[in-house]
Image (tube, grey):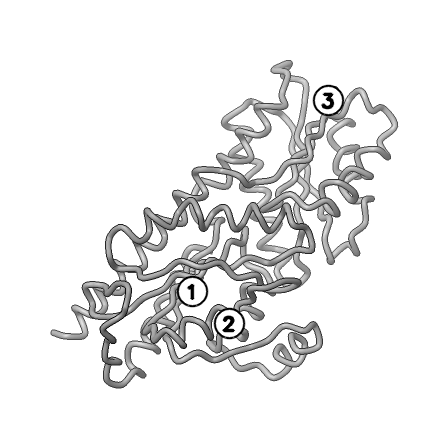
Amino acid sequence: MKLFYSTIVTIILTVFMTSCGTEKKQTSNEAANSTSGEKIGVLLVNHGSHSEGWRKMLKDIELDVRDDIMKSGDIAEVRTAFMEYTEPSIATQMKKFDAENYDRVIVVPIFLTISSHTSNDIPNIVGLANDPKVKEELKAEGIETYTSKARVLVTPLLDFPTVLKKNITRRAKALSNGSGDEGVALIAYGDEEFNQQWEEMVEDIGRYLKAQTGIGSISYGWCGHLVRYSSEPTKKAIDQILDLEERAIVIPVLVANDEHFQGEIIQKGVDMVEDQKRVVYKQDAILPDANINKWVVKIVAETVAELKGTKEVAAK
């Protein structure tokens, strides 16, 4: 997976560095200029949700990381965009960057791992890809696509560092009674096109969780479109744990808290278990997590450093 995304980043960098013409002249009222001479913005992109609480959790990331990202002077602005359901959309924010004469926008997807959204939708929305079928599907869903004047670079996803595994481990420990006779059911969204990668992600989390806590059994289930938002996979994952252990801890592997997923789909699956005393579940999410925010700051800094290095090499 790391090699896959490193290759994607390298390809995008190469295409845009070789295809660009002369640099746009900087206007006198620009807020900041990077040492490379470019006006660079950061766009934090997430899936979006009808839930106001869900959206606030994602917006809070921007508020927390803004100062740390901008203090170097390389980044002129940090914004948030929702892929669907609500404004500001990705297209809306990219148009705003163009209106303000940005040379480049670093897109940071706040997504767990590769999915049809990160592999197909977002590249087509920002103009890095031009797949007529995908664009038609996006249009049918009311999602606007926009090819910006600013060059776009998309960073890797959250499954790269250990930050996600540490998050799940922390939450599992908080619910554990330390008896040594309990297991964890990981409930994630899932993705049909990239099911193998999603399975690898939760299995990797499970191995880390076992090593860090001594918890003996791990299971997982999907709760999203792949299973038609059914509660049955959640119940099945819990039953798998209870067949082996005395107690099942249910952990949502979801970015933010959504009343529909944590409050209805997963909760209903928990409620379907016959012996409720053997199940512990908290309607929480990966966010808020200060380590996630630190990762966002870090991935932007690393991307800027890579851009500077590429520019220096090209100048030699």
Task: Specify the farthest residue to the left.
Answer: 316
Callout 2–callout 3 Cβ contact below 8 Å: no
Give the x, y percent position of residue 57: 56, 45
Which dot, 3 or 1, sits closer to the camera?
A: 1
Give the x, y percent position of residue 190: 67, 53
State the mark number for residue 123.
Answer: 2
Query: What is the three-letter code of the residue carrying label 2?
Result: Pro
What is the secondary structure assignment of the residue under circle 1?
Answer: strand
Look at mark 3 in the image and give the residue it sits on: 247
Query: What is the three-letter code of the residue carrying label 1?
Result: Val
The answer to whether 79 appears left or right of 14 in the picture is right
Q: Earlier in the sequence, mark 2 or mark 3?
A: 2
Look at mark 1 in the image and give the residue it sits on: 154
Real-space Cα distance between discs 3 and 1? 41 Å
Which dot, 2 or 3, sits closer to the camera?
A: 2
Real-space Cα distance between discs 2 and 3? 43 Å
Q: Work out whether 101 lies above or below 219.
A: below
